[in-house]
């Protein structure tokens, strides 16, 4: 049974960065902006978090640095797409390329160094409960943040006026503008939130998952997070489900590799990516579902008449 | 507070269409100089290392051509895709698959030689790349699945597949345990253009021919009109009687074939064997090349040379100034950002406006 | 020019002096003066493109004037955004609604209110207000499911909830049946009796004469008259609006024997393509050579879907559902239907009928590359730029298309000129069948008259013309018979001699039985 709890713990650790990055992007897309730069912001978060933690010896500074790194990079994206109305797809791609390149540069001096790990929670008595103690009370702090974020975003989007306003912008930015809603301001905040989340997700990778810095260590997780948002039809709790599903697939294939079934490790490693494709196909087949749930102004440039 | 206002131009500005890549390049140089100064390296010598030094020696120019060829070839295909609003991000994967399929003959049938070998390899490379690109195309046309994510996921799959082949089935038994296939015999190597001066191979010829053909097609033929129309106004494209799903296939297969050709050219021309990794990210850098060239095949030739220059410059600056070669990647990313920003000027005039201070009077 | 200023004792509610606004080279408003007193229904008259929408957007804070002053209750104000306009007491109902399809009615209203009130409270207030003013609405309905008339009610109720003193209505009856328009007028009179004022934008003269106290007439951005509509005639108002005499459209009656049926639609059905689309059921219609058939109907009753079905952008299940010149084309695409002699002009100019960023010459190729392949294309599909340029010039001259460059992008042309080009492009082929959806929407009077005349002449020369339009005046001008679309069904066509606004209006509202089912008429009244 301890094995089961261990496996569940590793699934949670694998799922957490996906969840955080996807929740952030969900908010961005709900406001009508498509930011394909999640991978770039995530890897910047990873390297900034790692570097800051090593330089200060404090992993919490690393967390803050990761969040800041992601948010700063997203500002660049925001400036181009919101103020200069550039093509969102191309700008997001370039954000990823820049982020990967920049992170390689920043991280050069840190390759091979042992990182500073973020300590897991340890509450006396509670954490020691058999089977579920560590699962509920013994995880790393970012895991708890991820759950809080999901609940928080859910509450924000569907129970507050600001969240309603954000959703309205994603539905029809022309109407929102005509009503006097400050479209660009909302979108900037959303984009920065998305960047902060991606940065936090990256920091989780380099401070909890594997406390070291390897170039390109996100390995496509940012892209999987993007797919998760589509898969979840832009609904927060579904993102959580999807993230954990993917976490399970990732962990599953790692264990399968370790058990040496005779299946080539490369094939097993490609399972998460293939799974992403399958999941995307399944969700996009239902046109009715996608038409109703997709924020109608997603990806369209916003240039109001003045 | 100052606010930026965009005012739509009645027509796209021809002036900025032509100038934008140059302005972007200039801005990148300036930012680069600032970057170098900030990390304590002398800006002007650094820029010299990057952009001038690689052009000073012939062998270096050949290296430039070797690197530019796959970039141009892939980017030409990408331009057809992007113009038609098909976002193929998986060119890297199609490059790899083309390299794999194109290498089947020399690896699996080592005895096969003669003048037919090279043309067959090139054709098989194109087929391999096109076939791999057909996957995201099919998923988009049939299921409306987002092609950005599917083509990108397939890149990771292709990389892993190549890694497995190079370490497993295709590994050279006499290779001392190192991953990689047998070294190709000369009959399977793309010939060099001017062997005495440097190592540039025929790949650049393919690239230029592809660029010219694509330029002509886009500009002057009905097919080119179809590509452009579907890309800018899909509903007008349907009204014209063009099939959007057929265009998805046309764009992806063309792009995949060119990326595949680039792949086998790299394997056959530059590397000489099928290794576990055959691309330093050409498929992604080609995206930057495509945009820098404003999605115009002729512009792409120039853009490809510029970006190849940054690769070489990175290596040169590392040697002469101790600057990390990763700076090249940052340069490339910055360049793309500036290109996108400058492109705004083509469609809009920019006006800086002071926020009006509200002076609503109270209702009496 | 009559000068009917306010009586000196009543304070003015709104006054505008010397307001100007320029977009690029276009002077949308040129030194406009206007005043409104409390308890007045004031008309803002002008044809399409006169500058009415621009003026009211500035009153509402969506745009900023380049010159001039706005006075509210005799105090100068600067209206920087809609929120401020609402705070002053100005409310606006746009012609193009600012609604969110994916949200409920109550949520939509909540977003336009400036105070943060609980949505349930808003829902109740909206329901009560709607009932009070004869505009019933359901707060929990999803806006995407509602009809155009229902959506307008939301717009009006949301405006009234802010307790405005001046309500601006931009072309409100353009989306209503005649009967719905009557209901609206009742609401307006009630508001007037409460001391509120209404700025009523329209180009419909009879309405303006009926309900408006005073009018300001705009032409090409300038004020050409202030008057009392009740003291004018429709033709004097029209000549103020349009200036030079516009050639009346001449419709010579159809002569000669009945022509062959060139376009036949037989029991056409089409499922709704998306959750917000309208399904088509059992549509049957025949258009013969030499005649113009009109299809009336309020927007959103399936006109666009019908157009796509006839044009071949969407294929039919059975080949015989659409026949052109005697052959089944239901399973053939639009290119084949064009080759069978049909031509099509869709409702949307930019993005459907023409590509906005492409030049006129390229847009010519758009619908003619197959039908005119011999002339316009060479070997290997190379485009013959010379031949296309000649043809483009021919069309531009024939239709009097005004443009600022030799071969400009489609988006650079005004709406009227682009529409002239698009129709001219199809007429240049001398098609046997022409199907056009909203031929003169958003088009200035001169261009509109020319287009309508061209349609009639095409028919008289032996072609079959089908006109789908929301503009009843237009249909009565050009049609030999009018059918009505309602909820995806088509009524039997009424010959023009028997058609009255009232009968057509009832059919538009779905009231009167008379919808054709396989050619049989049910329950004639």
Image (tube, coloured by chain):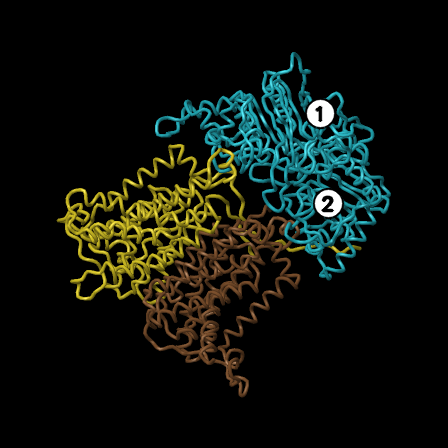
Q: Is residue C98 left or right of residue C355?
A: right
Q: Which residue is identified by label 1?
A: C476
Q: Colour of chain C?
A: cyan
Q: Which residue is identified by label 2?
A: C150
The N terminus of chain B - image quarter: bottom right
Identify whether B44 is placed above or below C143: below
Q: Colour of chain A?
A: brown
Q: Position of residue A97 (x, y in %)?
A: 39, 58
Answer yes or no: is residue B22 visible. Answer: no
Please state which of residues A158 and C337 is positioned toward the viewer in this rendering: C337
Please state which of residues C519 and A97 is positioned toward the viewer in this rendering: C519
Q: Colour of chain B?
A: yellow
Secondary structure under badge 2? helix
CB within 8 Å, label 1 to label 2: no
Q: Earlier in the sequence, mark 1 or mark 2?
A: 2
Identify whether A259 is placed above or below C463: below
Mark 1 Cα-neighbour bin, 10 Å: few <14, some 14–19, many ≥20: some
Q: Position of residue A295 (x, y in %)?
A: 57, 53
Count of numbered labels shown in the rendering:
2
Q: Chain of mark 1?
A: C
Residue C522 got which mark? none
Q: Chain of mark 2?
A: C
Q: Is residue B120 left or right of residue A38?
A: left
Q: Position of residue B140 (x, y in %)?
A: 45, 48
């Amino acid at each position: 049974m301890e094995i089961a709890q261990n496996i569940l713990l590793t699934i949670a650790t694998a799922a957490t960065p996906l969840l955080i990055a996807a929740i952030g992007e969900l908010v961005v897309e709900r406001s009508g902006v498509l930011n394909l730069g999640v991978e770039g912001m995530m890897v910047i978060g990873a390297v900034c978090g790692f570097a800051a933690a090593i330089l200060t010896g404090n992993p919490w500074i690393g967390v803050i640095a990761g969040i800041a790194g992601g948010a700063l990079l997203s500002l660049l994206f925001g400036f181009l797409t919101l103020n200069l109305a550039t093509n969102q797809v191309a700008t997001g791609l370039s954000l990823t390329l820049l982020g990967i390149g920049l992170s390689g540069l920043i991280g050069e001096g840190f390759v091979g160094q042992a990182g500073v790990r973020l300590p897991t929670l340890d509450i006396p008595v509670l954490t020691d409960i058999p089977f579920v103690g560590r699962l509920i009370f013994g995880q790393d702090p970012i895991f708890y943040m991820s759950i809080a974020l999901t609940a928080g975003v859910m509450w924000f989007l569907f129970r507050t006026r600001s969240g309603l306003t954000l959703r309205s912008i994603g539905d029809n930015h022309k109407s929102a503008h005509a009503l006097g809603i400050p479209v660009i301001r909302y979108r900037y905040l959303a984009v920065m939130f998305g960047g902060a989340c991606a940065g936090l997700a990256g920091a989780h990778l380099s401070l909890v998952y594997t406390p070291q810095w390897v170039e390109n260590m996100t390995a496509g997780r940012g892209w999987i997070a993007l797919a998760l948002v589509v898969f979840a039809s832009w609904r927060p709790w579904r993102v959580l489900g999807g993230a954990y599903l993917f976490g399970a697939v990732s962990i599953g294939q790692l264990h399968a590799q370790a058990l040496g079934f005779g299946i080539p490790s490369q094939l097993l490693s490609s399972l998460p990516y293939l799974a992403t494709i399958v999941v995307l196909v399944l969700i996009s087949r239902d046109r009715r579902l996608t038409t109703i749930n997709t924020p109608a102004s997603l990806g369209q440039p916003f240039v109001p008449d003045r | 507070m100052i606010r930026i206002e965009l005012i739509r131009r009645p027509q796209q500005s021809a002036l900025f269409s032509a100038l934008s890549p140059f302005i972007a390049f200039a801005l990148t140089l300036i930012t680069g100089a600032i970057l170098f100064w900030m990390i304590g390296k002398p800006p002007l010598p650094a820029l010299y290392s990057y952009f001038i030094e690689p052009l000073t020696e012939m062998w270096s120019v050949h290296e430039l051509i070797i690197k530019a060829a796959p970039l141009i070839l892939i980017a030409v295909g990408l331009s057809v895709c992007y113009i038609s609003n098909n976002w193929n991000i998986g060119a890297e994967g199609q490059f790899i698959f083309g390299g794999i399929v194109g290498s089947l003959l020399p690896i699996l049938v080592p005895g096969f030689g003669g003048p037919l070998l090279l043309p067959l390899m090139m054709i098989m490379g194109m087929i391999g790349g096109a076939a791999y690109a057909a996957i995201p195309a099919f998923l988009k046309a049939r299921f409306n699945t987002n092609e950005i994510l599917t083509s990108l996921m397939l890149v990771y799959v292709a990389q892993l597949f190549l890694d497995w082949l190079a370490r497993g089935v295709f590994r050279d038994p006499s290779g001392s345990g190192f991953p990689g296939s047998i070294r190709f015999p000369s009959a399977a190597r793309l010939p060099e253009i001017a062997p005495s001066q440097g190592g540039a191979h025929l790949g650049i010829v393919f690239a230029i021919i592809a660029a010219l053909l694509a330029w002509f097609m886009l500009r002057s033929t009905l097919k080119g009109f179809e590509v452009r129309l579907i890309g800018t106004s899909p509903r007008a494209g349907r009204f014209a009687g063009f099939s959007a799903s057929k265009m998805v296939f046309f764009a992806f297969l063309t792009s995949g074939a060119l990326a595949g050709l680039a792949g086998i050219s790299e394997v056959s021309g530059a590397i000489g064997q099928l290794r576990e990794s055959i691309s330093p990210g050409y498929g992604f850098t080609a995206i930057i090349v495509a945009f820098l060239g404003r999605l115009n095949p002729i512009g792409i030739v120039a853009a490809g040379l510029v970006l190849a220059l940054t690769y070489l410059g990175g290596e040169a600056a590392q040697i002469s100034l101790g600057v990390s070669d990763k700076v090249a990647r940052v340069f490339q990313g910055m360049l793309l950002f500036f290109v996108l920003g400058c492109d705004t000027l083509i469609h809009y005039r920019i006006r800086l406006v002071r926020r009006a201070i509200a002076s609503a009077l109270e209702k009496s | 020019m009559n000068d009917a200023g306010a009586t000196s004792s009543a304070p003015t509610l709104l006054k505008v002096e010397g307001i100007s606004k320029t977009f690029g080279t276009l002077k949308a408003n040129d030194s406009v003066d206007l005043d409104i007193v409390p308890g007045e229904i004031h008309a803002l008259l002008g044809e399409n493109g006169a500058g009415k929408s621009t003026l009211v957007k500035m009153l509402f804070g969506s745009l900023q004037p380049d010159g001039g002053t706005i006075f509210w209750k005799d105090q100068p104000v600067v209206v920087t955004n809609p929120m401020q306009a609402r705070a002053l007491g100005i409310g606006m109902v746009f012609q193009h609604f600012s609604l969110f399809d994916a949200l409920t009615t109550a949520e939509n209203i909540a977003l336009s209110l400036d105070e943060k009130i609980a949505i349930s409270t808003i829902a109740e207030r909206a329901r009560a207000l709607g009932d009070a003013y004869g505009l019933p609405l359901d707060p929990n309905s999803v806006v995407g499911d509602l009809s155009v008339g229902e959506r307008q009610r939301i717009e009006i109720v949301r405006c009234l909830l802010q307790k405005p003193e001046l309500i601006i209505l931009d072309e409100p009856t353009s989306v209503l049946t005649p009967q719905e328009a009557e209901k609206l007028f009742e609401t307006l009179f009630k508001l007037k009796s409460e001391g509120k004022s209404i700025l009523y934008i329209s180009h419909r003269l009879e309405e303006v004469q009926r309900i408006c106290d005073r009018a300001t007439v705009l032409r090409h951005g300038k004020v050409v008259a202030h008057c009392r509509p009740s003291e004018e005639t429709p033709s004097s108002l029209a000549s103020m609006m349009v200036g030079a005499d516009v050639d009346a459209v001449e419709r010579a009656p159809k002569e000669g024997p009945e022509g062959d049926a060139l376009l036949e639609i037989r029991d056409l059905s089409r499922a709704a393509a998306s959750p917000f689309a309208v399904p088509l059921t059992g549509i049957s219609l025949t258009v013969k050579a030499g005649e113009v058939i009109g299809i009336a109907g309020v927007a959103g009753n399936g006109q666009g879907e019908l157009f796509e079905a006839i044009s071949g952008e969407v294929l039919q299940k059975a080949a015989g559902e659409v026949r052109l010149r005697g052959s089944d084309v239901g399973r053939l695409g639009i290119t084949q239907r064009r080759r069978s002699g049909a031509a099509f002009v869709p409702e949307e100019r930019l993005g459907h009928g023409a590509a906005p960023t492409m030049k006129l010459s390229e847009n010519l190729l758009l619908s003619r590359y197959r039908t005119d392949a011999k002339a316009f294309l060479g070997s290997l599909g190379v485009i013959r730029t010379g031949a296309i340029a000649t043809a483009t010039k021919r069309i531009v001259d024939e239709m009097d298309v005004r443009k600022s460059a030799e071969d400009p992008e489609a988006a650079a042309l005004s709406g009227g000129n682009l529409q002239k080009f698009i129709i001219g492009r199809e007429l240049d082929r001398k098609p046997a069948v022409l199907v056009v959806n909203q031929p003169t929407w958003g088009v200035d009077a001169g261009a509109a008259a020319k287009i309508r005349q061209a349609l009639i002449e095409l028919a008289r020369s032996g072609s079959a013309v089908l006109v789908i339009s929301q503009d009843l005046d237009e249909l009565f001008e050009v049609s030999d018979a009018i059918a009505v679309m309602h909820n995806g069904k088509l009524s039997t066509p009424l010959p023009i001699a028997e058609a009255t606004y009232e009968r057509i209006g009832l059919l538009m509202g779905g009231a009167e039985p008379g919808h054709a089912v396989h050619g049989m008429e049910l329950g004639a009244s």
